[in-house]
Amino acid sequence: MTAFIDEGSGPPVLLSASLGTTAAMWAPQRERLREHRRVISYDHRGHGDSPVPPGPYRLDDLTADAVALLDSLQIEEVDVVGVSLGGTVGLALAVEHPDRVRSLVTVNAPVFADDPEFWRRRAAAVRAEGMGIATAGLLGRWYSPADAAAPSILIARTVSGVDRLDPQGYAACCEAIAGTDLRDRLADIRCPVLAVNGLADAVVPAHHADLIAAGVPGARHIALPGAGHLLTQEIPDELHDLLLEHWAAVNGKDAS
């Protein structure tokens, strides 16, 4: 069973995490949203307290896990917010299960693997050498230079937590990324979509947010100067405001 945290009450929102992190990464969003929303954050398979089935994994597997979680909680329709791999899962949910996704916000989410072989090599290296190969230089890749230079307690815990992941599960998720390409499916998405990217992101190139904005009918795109990959932790107040604005537009009224 997928590990999850279920907090608050109100319209449900599903928070889908990045590769290498768990539901704990969403602490700033959970704190802000649970006052007026039902907030479900969860661990992808192979991460945290979720099961580690044999790999390789596919994006379809991660998507099916999210749907099974919603089914178990008897949630028919949900607003989805996903960062990095979690945003890719959100896109796949909107493509394959349009009746379940009321709206979607992606944050630094890849639409396809720019270099599939990189991710296959990463998977092989982690299986052979352990998680240390994945954590080297991670602080500078995940965060803007300012936050990497003076990391908060949450940022330090998020980075150190990667060492505690199961290498097999992490590697299998790398293989899911390697096999992902949603470029030809973006036009099938019908829910309101906001694509957010940080211009200081050293992991996912900005052209992915451009692809979402151009490919999804009616999608909006906001680029944030100075923000890094896990901007969810760097600028939580600014992101919170963007979420409320997006949901208000979806509902035609204040969604806070």
Image: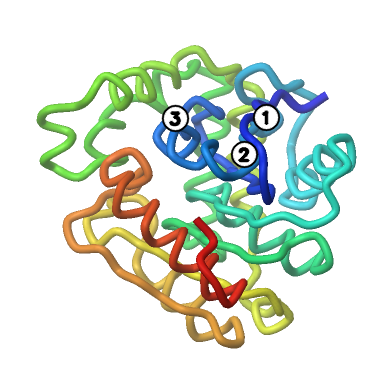
Q: Which is nearer the N-term, disc 1 or disc 3? A: 1
Q: Which is nearer the N-term, disc 2 or disc 3? A: 3
Q: Which is nearer the N-term, disc 1 or disc 2? A: 1
Q: Mark 3 points at which residue?
A: 27
Q: In this view, does 256 lie to the left or right of 6?
A: left
Q: Is residue 53 above or below residue 244?
A: above
Circle 1 residues within 10 Å: few <14, some 14–19, many ≥20: some
The CA span between labels 2 and 3 is 11 Å
Q: Residue at x 35, y 24 (%)?
A: 159
Q: Which amino acid does label 2 sit on?
A: Val
Q: In this view, does 107 lie above or below 43?
A: below
Q: Mark 2 points at which residue?
A: 39
Within the image, what quadrant is residue 49 found in?
Answer: top right
Q: Which amino acid does label 1 sit on?
A: Asp
Badges 2 and 3: C-beta atoms under 8 Å apart? no
The CA span between labels 1 and 3 is 12 Å
Badges 1 and 2: C-beta atoms under 8 Å apart? yes
Q: Residue at x 44, y 56 (%)?
A: 107
Q: Residue at x 30, y 69 (%)?
A: 223
